[in-house]
Amino acid sequence: MLACRIHAKDDLRVETLAAPAPGPGEVLLRLGAGGICGSDLHYYYEGRNGSFVVREPLIPGHEASATVEAVGPGVTRVGKGDKVAVSPSHACGRCEGCREGREQLCSAMRFLGSASLFPHVQGMFRELFVMGERQCYPVAGDVSLGEIAFAEPLAVALHAVNRGGALLGKSVLVTGAGTIGCLTVIAARLAGARRITVSDVLDRPLEQAVRVGADATLRADRDGARIAAPQFDVCYEVSGNFGALKSCVAAVKRGGVVVQVGTLPHEPLPFVVNEIMAKEIDLRGAFRWGIEFDWAVDYLSARRVDVRPLLSGQYALSDAVAAFAAAADKNRSTKVQVVCA
């Protein structure tokens, strides 16, 4: 079978590996569509994602759909031929975080396509892979494998919105109009936000944000004064840019909430916290997701959300290098996926 592996910075290879077989309680899956995430791009172009460094060949890919090829003994949740959304989260279920219902904070988390542990936890950019039964969410109906692969990033956005608190009637700022930023717009609208504004430094991502429901857009490089005026109840920093976080702190109303969703650079960052103190701002983190993955699958399956405007292109797994190049070009792509030919 073919697999995409990152060996080091700027070193991505499509290689032939042995096909796996499912054991008891396991499912053999054929990749349907796998979305290239910002973290995948960091691993490829920088050899790291934040503090997680590639130390051995890493198969990326943590947002994917698949079809069931075969099931191991004891599997009842899915059957051969089923379309599934695949959860990349392997929480232990025993630690304090898991027992408190916050599995995304699991102290023994194994997250697919991540270099956070060594040996690394291999991801899903391969023709065939094995998953535990509970990681497979069957999806019925005519929803496509490309749409189903949005379950993981949509879950990230739903969790981020959850962390921001009740949004009914609230004004919202989202800094960053990439995939997660646009999905945060969708999630905020589902949560009842009254007005949603999105900022970015490029026109194309802002146009995409409007397509999925943003009420207004701002160019962060030109409209700094308009962004900085305190006018938003909740701000979501999704770009992973320190300047955007500072803008959120300035733009949020007194007593408001700022949610940090994007991964900031690994280097220590200067940060003046007096404004957080004086305005009594709640600064919250949003890391991955928990139960929101289930919600994301339900929303996509029922077409309560439409993610199709965000899908910019699909490339054969054998053409993964070109797929990553397209995904890195924000002037022409939002979400790029690799698929089995």
Image (spheres, grey):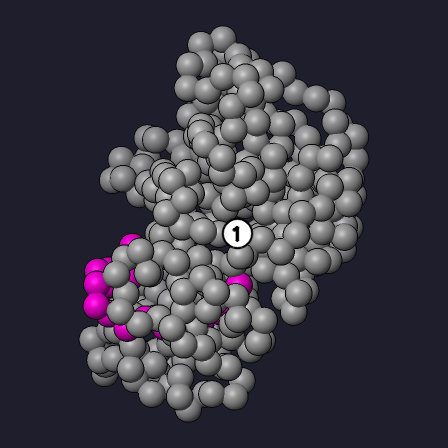
Check if residue 161 falls in the magenta segment: yes
Task: Write the residue at 66% across / 57% down.
Answer: 327
Number of residues whose C-alpha sits closer than 10 Å to that of mark 1, classed few (under 14), some (14–19) or many (20 or more): few
Along the horizontal axis of the image, is 206 left or right of 57? left
Residue 54, placed above or below residue 254: above
Q: Which residue is outermost to the bottom?
A: 225
Magenta stretch, residue numbers: 160-178
Q: Is residue 268 left or right of residue 289?
A: right
In x, y percent, where is residue 172? 32, 71
Q: Tell me how many marks there are.
A: 1
Q: Position of residue 276 (x, y in %)?
A: 28, 77
Query: Which residue is labeled 1 in the image?
Result: 308
Q: Amino acid at mark 1?
A: Arg
Residue at left offset 40%, top offset 50%: 305
Residue 138 sits inside the magenta stretch: no
Q: Quadrant of the C terminus?
A: top right
Q: Secondary structure at mark 1?
A: helix
Point 35% across, 83% down: residue: 250
Determine if residue 260 is in view.
no
Quadrant containing the N terminus is: top right
**Can residue 128 be spotted in the picture?**
yes
Asked which quadrant contains residue 104, the reply is top left
